[in-house]
């Protein structure tokens, strides 16, 4: 049954005939992406919000059952496209858990480094766009200028600014080069000034604070009950952070704080994101200065990643590994079992539940998308607020429709 | 909260049919579908698994050695001790119904709707069990293994809107 005002009206709504139905989206500048919300308004107050999603559904999980473990990384780029490299890491984190591959220390540090860069880049856009939606345009430009620099770093690192596809099973595409390190050092030096300026612009801005404070309040109990994760949960006082709770990659060696707030409103979510950017910057600094020497990919014995050409042409093990990996009927040795691996992506817990069936193509590749779970609480958060608060709440949840619909 | 081993032992005492396994640090318990809701309620209310991380489903149609068609997967976690536990249950055609866990966790609402949309598992007691990602006119469940990657041509189900009607 199509979702129209006629089908939405319940039989007993005769006394509420004065309610006005407004279609918000699917093509609206303030939704930023393609999603639709049917709002029932009493004057300007939202009585009921009914999300209607699926406009960008492109069957990523079905495609995951037809592409092999290395090919699917290109699809993960397109999920949360404001921090694609964190999705790459999340996918191969889960794959390596299923395959039982232990990464080299250098690879762990490099992946941690790019994850934290992705977190900064995500929070810059999500806070920036949140500011844009409530009227702070300059704030957005400050954020986007720094985001461009992260794009430049990623371009130097892996050749792509946006769809990075940087990780491989058992390693990464390229080792980090001195030029990348130089660029990240310059970024680390320059970036704190931008956060300070961004905070100066809006933290005490009357319009910004009035539109954010007390809007979309999520209590701690409700955050847990509704499966919130990441900055949204931490702004409500849930201290869960997978980087601390189940340290993966190099996070056990690093010194950082988990940023939490208690209020649970849009302003708290903004503050948590700003604080997380500062912590991420600390992490970028620490990982950058402590990258261990040694090989970046796992050895040829693991038979997970293509060896270098030098190894292929000069050693018999390299030749055999290369042959085993490129032949269509060989490839990875995958157990007939299932594993769930998750990382703390910028938007919350991003996990993959992968079922292996012995071939090098996943039997099932379920993605736990944080945007999807956060958007499901949107009707609860917006109830009773005004129409203008819709964009503030949407921005503070950081809904990415490509990840929402997959 | 007790240790995870004690919880699993207690769970096996409550549900003797439950089988447990451990793979790469993921602790998993398979329980019969009839006691799934009670088990999850017990885990939530008295064992501290307060967070439902995800609900998903796997179609084991062509899976080597599989005896059941669908496996429902509930990923639980504790926000206090950061312990994780995976609860699975098996469903077979024609009875693809199971008790919804929305009364326990409000977050299960959209997760179960997605499983219904993609696999056709019916969650009894769900407040709003409609398709969520696929359009309402869609007639198949696309993540089932007998559904081809390129679709079955469901486009004829969709009404054609011409410019004058739009």
Image (cartoon, grey):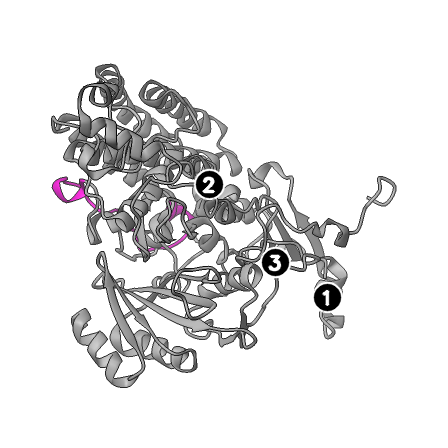
Instruction: Name the residue furthest right.
Output: B164
Q: Chain of mark 2?
A: A
In front here: A256 or A64?
A64
Q: Earlier in the sequence, mark 2 or mark 1?
A: 1
Picture coordinates of residue A352, whole percent (x, y): 37, 50
Q: Quadrant of residue A147?
A: top left
- SS for dot 3: strand
Is the residue A299 above or below the residue B154 in the image?
A: above
Front: mark 3 or 2:
2
Tag 3 near tag 2, CB within 8 Å:
no
> Disc 3 marks which residue?
A50
A242 to the left or right of A87: left
How packed is label 1: few (under 14 Cα within 10 Å), some, or many (20 or more)? few
Q: Earlier in the sequence, mark 1 or mark 3?
A: 1
Q: Chain of mark 3?
A: A
* Distance from the alpha carbon under mark 2 to that under mark 1: 34 Å
Picture coordinates of residue A216, whole percent (x, y): 47, 54
Picture coordinates of residue A241, whole percent (x, y): 26, 51
Q: Where, quadrant-wise, is the N terminus of chain A in this rendering? A: bottom right
Whether residue A282 is visible: no
Is the residue A159 above or below the residue A40 in the image?
A: above
**What segment carries the magenta color?**
A250-269
In the image, what residue occupies the spot 70% across and 49% down? B153
> Disc 2 marks which residue?
A79
In front here: A359 or B164?
A359
> Disc 1 marks which residue?
A9
- SS for dot 2: loop
């Amino acid at each position: 049954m199509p979702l129209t005002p006629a089908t939405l009206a319940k039989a007993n709504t005769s006394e509420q005939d004065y309610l006005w139905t407004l279609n918000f989206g699917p093509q609206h500048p303030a939704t930023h992406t393609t999603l639709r919300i049917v709002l029932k308004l009493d004057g300007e107050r939202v009585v009921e919000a009914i999300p209607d999603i699926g406009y960008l559904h492109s069957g990523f999980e079905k495609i995951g059952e037809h592409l092999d473990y290395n090919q699917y990384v290109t699809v993960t780029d397109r999920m949360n496209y404001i921090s694609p490299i964190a999705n790459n890491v999340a996918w191969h984190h889960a794959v390596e858990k299923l395959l039982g591959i232990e990464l080299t220390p250098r690879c762990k540090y490099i992946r941690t480094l790019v994850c934290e860069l992705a977190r900064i880049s995500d929070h810059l856009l999500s806070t920036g766009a949140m500011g844009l939606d409530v009227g702070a345009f300059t704030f957005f430009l400050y954020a986007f200028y720094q985001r461009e620099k992260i794009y430049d770093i990623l371009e130097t690192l892996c050749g792509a600014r946006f769809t990075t596809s940087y990780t491989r099973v058992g390693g990464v595409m390229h080792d980090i080069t001195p030029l990348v390190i130089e660029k990240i050092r310059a970024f680390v030096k320059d970036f704190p000034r931008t956060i300070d300026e961004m905070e100066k612009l809006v933290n005490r801005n009357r319009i910004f604070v009035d539109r954010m404070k007390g809007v979309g309040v999520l209590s701690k109990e409700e955050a847990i009950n509704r499966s919130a994760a990441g900055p949204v949960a931490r702004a409500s006082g849930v201290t869960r952070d997978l980087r601390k709770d189940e340290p993966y990659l190099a996070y056990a060696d690093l010194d950082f704080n988990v940023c939490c707030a208690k209020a649970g409103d849009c302003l708290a979510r903004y503050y948590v994101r700003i604080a997380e950017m500062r912590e991420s910057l600390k992490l970028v600094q620490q990982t950058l200065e402590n990258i261990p020497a040694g090989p970046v990919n796992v050895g040829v014995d693991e038979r997970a990643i293509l060896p270098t050409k030098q190894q292929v042409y000069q050693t018999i093990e390299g030749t055999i590994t290369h042959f085993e990996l490129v032949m269509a009927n060989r490839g990875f040795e995958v157990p007939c079992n299932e594993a769930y691996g998750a990382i703390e992506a910028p938007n919350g817990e991003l996990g993959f539940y992968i079922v292996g069936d012995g071939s090098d193509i996943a039997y099932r590749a379920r993605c736990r998308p944080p945007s999807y779970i956060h958007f499901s609480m949107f009707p609860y958060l917006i109830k009773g607020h005004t129409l203008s608060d819709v964009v503030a709440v949407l921005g503070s949840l950081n809904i990415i429709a490509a990840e929402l619909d997959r | 909260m007790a240790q995870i081993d004690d919880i699993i032992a207690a769970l096996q005492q409550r549900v003797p049919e439950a089988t447990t396994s451990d793979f790469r640090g993921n602790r998993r318990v398979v329980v019969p579908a009839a006691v799934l809701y009670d088990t999850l309620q017990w885990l939530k209310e008295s064992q501290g698994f307060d967070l439902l991380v995800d609900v998903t489903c796997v179609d084991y149609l062509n899976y080597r050695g599989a005896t059941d068609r669908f496996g429902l997967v509930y990923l639980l976690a504790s926000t206090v001790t950061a312990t994780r536990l995976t609860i699975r249950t098996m469903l077979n055609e024609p009875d693809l119904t199971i008790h919804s866990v929305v009364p326990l966790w409000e977050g299960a609402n959209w997760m179960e709707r997605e499983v219904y949309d993609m696999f056709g598992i019916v969650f009894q007691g769900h407040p709003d069990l409609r398709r969520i990602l696929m359009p309402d006119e869609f007639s198949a469940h696309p993540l089932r293994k007998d559904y081809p990657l390129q679709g079955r041509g469901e486009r004829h189900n969709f009404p054609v809107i011409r410019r004058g009607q739009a």
